[in-house]
Amino acid sequence: MPMDGEPAASSGLGLPDYTSGVSFHDQAYLPETEDFQAGLYVTESPQPQEAEAVSLGRLSDKSSTSETSLGEERAAEEGGAPMDKSSLRSGDSSQDLKQSEGSEEEEEEDEGCVVVLEEEEGDGEQDEITRTSELTLSDTVLSLDTVVARGGETDGEEEEEPLTEQSEGKEQKILLDTACKMVRWLSARLGPTVASRYVARNLLRLLTSCYVGPTRQQFTMSSGESPPLSAGNIYQKRPVLGDIVSGPVLSCLLHIAHLYGEPVLTYQYLPYISYLVAPGSTSGPSRLNSRKEAGLLAAVTLTQKIIVYLSDTTLMDILPRISHEVLLPVLSFLTSLVTGFPSGAQARTVLCVKTISLIALICLRIGQEMVQQHLSEPVATFFQVFSQLHELQHQDLKLDAVGRSEGQLPEVAFSDGQQRLVDPSLLDELQKVFTLEMAYTIYVPFSCLLGDIIRKIVPNHELVGELAGLYLESISPSSRSPASVEPAVPNTGPEWDPQNGGGPRDDSHSGTFGSVLVGNRIQIPDDPQPESPGLLGPVPGAGSGGVSSEEDNALKRELPRSAHGLSGNWLAYWQYEIGVSQQDAHFHFHQIRLQSFPGHSGAVKCVAPLSSEDFFLSGSKDRTVRLWPLYNSGDGTSETAPRLIYTQHRKSVFFVGQLEAPQYVVSCDGAVHVWDPFTGKTLRMMEPWDSRVPLTAVAVMPAPHTSITMASSDSTLRFVDCRKPGLQHEFRLGGGLNPGLVRSLAVSPSGRSVVAGFSSGFMVLLDTRTGLVLRGWPAHEGDILQIKAVEGSVLVSSSSDHSLTVWKELEQKPTHHYKSASDPIHTFDLYGSEVVTGTVSNKIGVCSLLEPPSQATTKLSSENFRGTLTSLALLPTKRHLLLGSDNGVIRLLA
């Protein structure tokens, strides 16, 4: 009788429209008062529990070989991947499933195998994917001035001397790099839904923590960021410490976007940014807390990176959302006259500089006409704060004792006719931020970017220009008038034309401003000029004179087309999944076809996913066992080829499973074959002891056991250890009765008991430690079709009498009993407290093991599944269903 293998998974799908984005109500974010302590990204010290990882880092200091393998070892420890454990087991299988994944995941996986231990200079002609995914360790935390050498170049004196501060910093860098490689590797291995729900979501939370505290908001010397991490920083050339700390997080987030495409940016990252910058629930004047303040900085930083990778069409589609859900909320905090920042003027200054860079980047991408149409309000709001402060300087605002005690703030009438609340205690902070230098920093790039349009969308541009002129007078030995502000600025933007009166060049190409439009790429000539001093950076607003040749792609980059990019059914299913609450413990089946696996020439008798859920096994009447990859590809209609075919069976294969401890595959056609899934080599074959007494059922013991249990037609149960020849144990199950043939075996998750189901409906429970029969009882009136053992001494059995019954091992009466109306349940699998069932009439049911019992049934449509359902397996982490049919095709549905 066919017996299904290990459990598998599944989930449901709705088709939300774009505006629905992500349901953040279901996401578990940290409270505002709580900090996310992630030692890998904290500068002060590594997490105490990472002692083992730190020791690995020390080892990797001694030889370049160990450094190269460190990421793989760490990934194996953290991911628990069965394929990679075997790479530590033998030399033959050292090129484990990561090698298989490499061909499946193409260049994305190749880059994850590189340990970068030196600062990237950015001048190599590397592929853009690799440059984005590799982590330059010079951008990491701890000892920012530490020079990292390659492991093979360690000094002999350092080995003899006690652990120095430099070696500790080096260790931490190696550990951080290993963690980042592990995250990138897992992101591809886990698939789009799990990676987005559990990896990307926590990386986004972690990004906020990178900017918490005044220390993280201090400007640092520019450290020559690698081009991928400097993308979008058009006018912010002086990073803060938080930018350096967040480098690895941003690198991992961009790697996930490279793997699964632009929808990750628009459907997951941007809605989360909107969540970060959204005003608080309390209305009225209030102070930000430190986490909200850090969230604003993180949101603007991440938005800069996202804009660069959005296509022109997508950017224009979501530009109104960016304006109203990102820019305007950020500006409302930045220019607020009643909301103070916990870190004072420093945090507000950093946010102001980052916002300038972000808006300027968008202006360069979309051109003057689109700026006037879509960004007039944000730009005008930004400039308006200078007029407000200018007017407040001429008013004597005082908060009397009564107003202070009652929390009342004075209202001030401004020249634009608006009445606004003003907190006099914040005026000093605002004046420290919106100084003459800041006016110069804002006015110069935007006057160049917008040209004459600035006069239309910014009513107070003349005032800001005058303030910028005053700043030039203060730093220049010769007096300058406001009208000479623009000619005096040395190459402050990519569009600057020193030979043309300092104004923007006329250009018929919208958004190029003196540059050359090559296809859809903006080519900007390099014209370096001396820089002017400034507290905010080398050149206010522009850094080193626009976009240099090294940053030719700083305005726009194409996301590489990945084999795992989301489209069609995969995209629709992913959109649904990222909005589902993580606390939802129910299995939802929506008949979304994700992938097909054709290849068997006979009926599929059994399907068993590997414990890592990245591969699965199938056995068929065609006498073959096939190993299939489970990486997403295509739009739901794609067909996947097997990675390996085992052809040593002589009869129809009715059982296949994974012996988890040694990572072997066990399959049975009447004789048991044990073979290596990495090479396809047969390791051991066990024929029936008597040709007249064939084997009728097989089961594998859970880790750490390495035994196989086999039942023969004479009701004898035998145990074989795959590591040793001969029998381990042999037990008789009949007990003088004639219960028939053993149809199904199931081993408890602890390995302490085995239950056997007979053709007569009789079930026997055996203690594997003593060999004693604990219980035997008539469970069903027909053949036992399948049995599963669950945690908590629970057994689930199905029979040809159309029943599905739930038992406690030592209780006489069943706890639940379900009856199928039309057909017997010949295959089922477990998901938490639910049972997913299948019948020959192609009906998928979901039964609850909890009170009150419930059952829901769905008929498979012929469009999604053809043929007759023969086997079923569930992927519990990914929440997918694998369905085998009598025509030899296996389909992945959700």
Image (cartoon, rainbow, N blue to C red):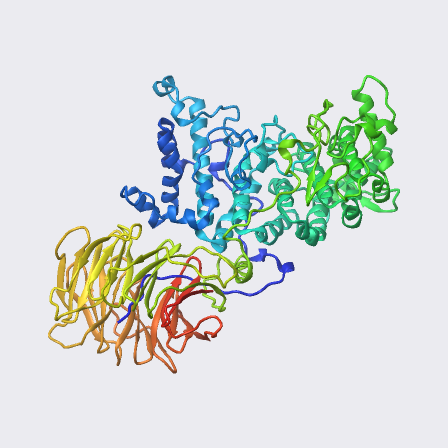
Please name the residue shown 59% across and 56% down the image.
22
Side of 59 relative to 356 (left or right) = left
Residue 626 image point, x, y percent: 33, 60
Is 53 rendered above or below residue 709? above
Image spot of residue 217 (x, y percent): 62, 33
Residue 58 visible, this orientation? yes
| Residue 805, quarter of picture | bottom left
Q: Is residue 409 visible?
A: no
Residue 744 lies, in percent from the top left, at 25, 69
- Which quadrant of the figure has residue 308? top right
Q: Residue at x 36, y 18 (%)?
A: 156
Identify the residue at image location x=37%, y=53%: 612
Furthest residue in direction bottom, as rendered: 822
Residue 646 position within the rendered picture, expressed as x and y whole percent measured from the top left: 29, 58
Depth check, front residue: 387 or 406: 387
Compare residues 348 and 250 and report the one nearer the observer.
Answer: 250
